[in-house]
Image: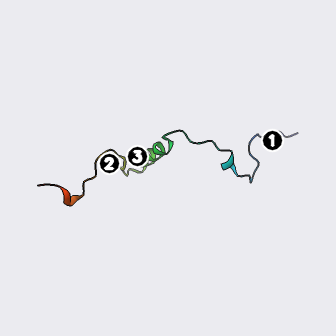
Amino acid sequence: MVRMLEGPAPGRDTAETAEEPADGAEFETFAHLDRLLGLDLIRGIGRAYVPSGARGG
């Protein structure tokens, strides 16, 4: 006799049974992908945006 693995049935929508991701999980995923791909987009987080024509001088 074959034992079936417990879990959702094939073809069943798993979004209904999925748990909410932990706080910050989306950011952490983005940060890891940014590092993996070498895009360096994270470096600007937390810095004030100053348009190029608005700098004094």
Q: Which residue is mark 2?
A: 44
Foreground disc of the pair 1, 2:
2
Q: Residues within 10 Å of mark 3 (few under 14, many from 20)?
A: few
Determine the CA span between mark 2 and mark 3. 13 Å
- Residue type, label 1: Met
Q: Which residue is mark 3?
A: 35
Point 76% across, 40% down: residue = 6
- Residue 50 locus on image (x, y percent): 24, 54
Mark 2, secondary structure of its residue:
helix
Q: Which residue is mark 1?
A: 4
Point 59% across, 42% down: residue = 20
Sequence-first tag of 1 and 2: 1
- Residue 17 locus on image (x, y percent): 68, 44
Contact? badges 1 and 3 (CB < 8 Å): no
Name the foreground residue: 50 vs 8. Answer: 50
Determine the CA span between mark 1 and mark 2. 49 Å
On-image quarter of the C terminus = bottom left
